Image (cartoon, rainbow, N blue to C red):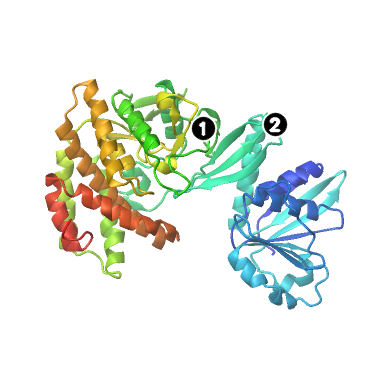
Amino acid sequence: MSGTPVISLFLKDEAETIRFGEDLALALKRGDCLALSGDLGAGKSSLARAFLRAMADDDELDVPSPTFTLVQAYDLRVPVAHFDLYRLGDPAELTELGFDEALQDGICLVEWPEMASDELPADRIALKLEHEGLGRKVTIAAPEKQAARIRRVLAIRDFIDAAGYTNAKRRFLTGDASLRAYEAVYAGDGKRRVLMDWPPLPEGPPVLDGKPYPKVAHIAENAYPFVAIANVLRQEGFAAPEIYQVDYDQGILLLEDLGTDGVLDLQGQPIADRYRASVACLAHLHSLTIPQDIRVTDSHVHHIPDFDRTAMKMEVRLVLDWHLPWKRGRTAASGAERDEYLAIWDRLIDELEASEKSLLLRDFHSPNIIWRDNERGIARVGLIDFQDAMIGPTAYDLASIVQDARVTVPPDLFRQLMDDYLSLRRTKGGFDEARFLKSWAIMSAQRNCKLAGLWVRLMQRDGKPGYMRHMPRTLSYLSVALEHETLAPLRDWCVRAGIVPSES
């Protein structure tokens, strides 16, 4: 493995070896092979045990040595096959042990890899443990892709230590459709905190006027927007997480844990009272005036971007660029179809000029709402995803929750939520209901056109086919929006394009 990046570190005792093994569980992914080598007593078994227990999130997981069985399989968050090749008779026997299948399905953790080095993948992560004084020296040789992940978990460990939580336990929490990931951090005080891992990315290719997609669509590229919106929401009494520590350059944030309850029941269906409380929270937010410029640090002011024509049209283009080719077996939209569709959207966006505008959280739906049963009022509704917040038609966020992209909102609950919101807004006075409902229909159509293309892009470009299960729901929601008379031209276009049925 000459020429591969090398990472070196020193573990002063058994506790640090265990902690490092746990951290590795956050770095490795399906298809990785971790080859552990070192003298007897150097800590291979301790590290392997810590890795497996962290992957299982079970400190008491029984981890028997596979010395005699040669392999022990674990059905975990990512399946792990633990190989001990000390008693391997012939390197070719590795195939008979199911190594290739195990690597395809998950992670292979290999002790005594030198017994079959020629049979192991060339892109393995080679980790060597050596005695050094009272501790252990670790040397890791790995291809850049895997090495970068390991360096990242080590950088996060340094960040946590610098925040004052030395020896904190870290566990995988979740990932999302973006490139952010989340960890649970358990310090000695017994309190769980949430770490957001949001690594900076190189600027993508230009898509419009020389700008990459995030800049055109106003997608947050660093932590400043998240911190700015969290602070202003908290000042207004909303339940957004407190920011304990942040490294803006590296994209690492340590946050308050708002809880684990959501707004769905055990069967994944909407809990009506929680959705109604979420809509009430939204109605209160829309009654406020939120400043567009928010000071984050002494040297940085975050300007909340406008949900402008360019951003709206960039999103609805996803139907043209991804949904239609998928629907038609890779046949792209014609030039005439594209021109007509975008001209329709220009006219619809013109209709939004007089609509009510305020802060849009942008993804106000079930995955991003925490239910806090012990709180009261708007504090019961925990808000955790708002880094892409913009200033635009308030109807957008109402469409996000009453037409939840991830779960079907039954028609009777949909009507109840709409009635709740409209009633709450009427009580404040100065609310133009007819104009709002027209804005709602346009924003619902805009959001669902975006999602209809996004699900295909996630499948085809990003290798995430699971999101396609939301497609029927998204198209059903789009049909509801298209019932409004203002959207008749878009409805006709969608029918002719085969996106929605003619009876819609």
Circle 1 crowding by C-alpha within 10 Å: few under 14, some 14–19, many from 20: many
Location of residue 155 (image quadrant): top right
Type of amino acid under label 1: Leu
Q: Is residue 187 above or below residue 153?
A: above
Could you tell me residue 97's position as x and y percent?
Answer: 71, 73
Identify the residue at image location x=75%, y=46%.
18
Type of amino acid under label 2: Gly
| Spatial CA span between label 1 and label 2 | 19 Å
Q: Of the numbered discs in the image, which one, if any, rests on residue 469?
A: none
Q: Is residue 43 above or below residue 105?
A: above
Could you tell me residue 471's position as x and y percent?
Answer: 33, 57
495 sits to left or right of 110: left
Could you tell me residue 173's position as x and y percent?
Answer: 56, 44
Identify the residue at image location x=87%, y=54%.
41
Q: Out of 51 and 477, give the one closest to the viewer.
A: 477
Could you tell me residue 323's position as x and y percent?
Answer: 29, 60
Q: Of the numbered discs in the image, which one, if any, rests on residue 258?
A: 1
491 sits to left or right of 372: left
Give the labeled residue for mark 2: 188
- Determine the secondary structure under disc 2: loop
Q: Out of 474 and 20, give the one closest to the viewer.
A: 474
Q: Out of 263 and 78, give the one closest to the viewer.
A: 263
Task: Give the mark nearest the N terminus, 1 or 2.
Answer: 2
Identify the residue at image location x=60%, y=54%.
77
Which quadrant would the C terminus be assigned to in this image?
A: bottom left
Q: Out of 274 and 199, give the one closest to the viewer.
A: 274
Location of residue 399 (image quadrant): top left
Circle 2 crowding by C-alpha within 10 Å: few under 14, some 14–19, many from 20: few
Q: Is residue 238 visible?
A: no
